Structure formats: C-alpha cells, structure tokens
Image (spheres, rainbow, N blue to C red):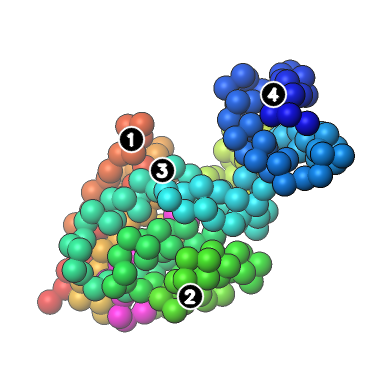
Amino acid sequence: MEKLSVKKQLEILLNKDFSSDEIYAFGFWIMPHLDTFNPTYRIAELTRICQELKNRKPIQYIFELAFFGDLHLKVNLHTLIPRPETEELCQLISLHFKDNDTIRGLDIGTGSGCIPIYLLCKHPQWEFDAMDIGADILDVAESNAKKYALHNRIHFHELDLFTMNTLPKDIQLLVSNPPYIGMEDMETLEANVLHHEPHSALFSPTLDSLLFYKKIAELANNSAIKKLSIWLEINQYKGEETLALFKSIGDAELLCDMSGNTRFLHCEITRQ
C-alpha cells in the first residue's frame, strides 16, 4: 500500500465523519504506523483504526501516545489526554522560578505524569512527588518517568486527596489539574471525551465542581509551609469563585490561556 493510496483510503473511510483537516492530521499518525506492517495486513489495520476513529475513540488512545511539548508520553484509558492548556500551565510555572532555584513539587492527580515530567526535564535540580488514586494510572506515569530517566527524581504515591490531612512539609510548589466539570455539564462534552476519557479525571464526584479546589485550599491553609507557590488549572466558568477560595489564604490571581480563557490560578503563600 503506497502512501498516496493510504491518503485516498482515509478519505474514503472517514470523509462522512471528519473534516479534510482532521483526516489530514490523522495521516501523520497512521502512515508511519502502517509502514511497520507487512503489506498484506496494512489494509486490515487501516480499516481497524478508521473504525475506532468513527467510534470517536481519540487517536491518542488508539496509539497509546500523546505529544506534550517535546515529550512523547504513553496514555491509555486510565489517563486523561494531556491538553495544550496544561502545557501552557507548565510554561508559566517554569518561567516563574529562577533557573538556579531548587524546588520540590507536589502534583495532585498526576495522570500520565505530564506536568512533573515536563518540569523535571526543564529543571534538572528539581524533584517531585506525584499522586493519583489508582495503580493503573500510576503505572502509566511511572513508565513515562522511566522513559525520560526521571524515576530517581519523581516519587509516585497511590493516594486519595480527600484522605489527606496535611501537605508534605518540604515542598515549595503545589500544582494540580483536578477534575472540575460538574456532573450537570456532562452532556455538553464531545463524544470522544465523554465516552472514552476517564470520568474520574474529568468530573467532580459530587454536584460541587469546586470540591477539589476547596480541599487543596484547606490543605494549603492548614500547612506549616513557610513559602508555597500554588498553580492550578481551573474551570474557566468558575474563575471568580475559585479565586475567592485562594484569596483568603494568600496572594492569588487568575491567568488566561492563549485563547483568552480564564484557565489558571496562581497563589503565593508566605508565612513568617
């Protein structure tokens, strides 16, 4: 199967379900993949992939791969697909600190490990603790950390945020992209997200979409950490409510993403 015929087959198989731009983008994933197959089996493999796409399975899950900055990260149905906005959050954090700062961070709800792995690759002197609620999730994150030889600088913990009474005493950075979509908004999501990405990483388990932020603010407020920098990805429609939680405990601000949406919260806590 020549590359030209692959493009034609993609158009034939997907034109009723996807735009030309989407099909063109799929080709960058699919054609190199098919090159690894015996020609006898390429049409069958192409048909299988296209059927999964038509079933709205994200291409990142089909190939168990997501691009995040310069990183090529493993993802699967246990982990959220890293978004460009989360990469923007990492860039903001990276720019906030000086190059020679020695930082120990905590990532709450690490998923694929994209946030700490990105930051550790940029800052060789940093270390991280990263937590999530399931071994299946942490297996993916650990695999990604080992791929980038970071397993000695990142420590994974299977832990539920709501069982925590305190934060680690030796951290200077707390970062999280927690679930922030209310259950009432479930039906507003695209099918590829709603039916394939893990609900535990998307939705608050209660009607309170700020549940995770309230717990993070409580832990930060009750900690004895002298200086703590908090960076969160937030629900753009709950910015002022989220800001109010953190303004009561530190110097907090909302930041916009490149699309102009209120997407991030930054809070600095300083104690004597």
Q: Residue at x 25, y 68 (%)?
A: 228
- Tell which circle, 1 or 4, labels the residue nearer the N-terminal end: 4
Residue position for label 1: 258
Which residue is at the front of the view, 109 or 7? 7
Report how far apart the C-alphas of labels 1 and 4 lie in the structure: 36 Å
**Labels 1 and 2: the sequence-earlier one:** 2
The residues colored magenta run 167-178
Indicate the secondary structure of the residue bearing disc 4. Answer: helix
Reply above or below: 201 against 133: above
Quadrant of the image occupied by residue 11: top right
Seen as rendered, the residue at the extreme left is: 272
Main SS class of the magenta portion in the image? loop
Name which residue type carries label 1: Met
Which residue was labeled with disc 4? 4
Q: Is residue 39 left or right of residue 162?
A: right
Q: Is residue 168 magenta?
A: yes
Residue in the foreground of this view, choosing between 163 and 100: 100
Mark 1 vs 3, N-terminal side: 3
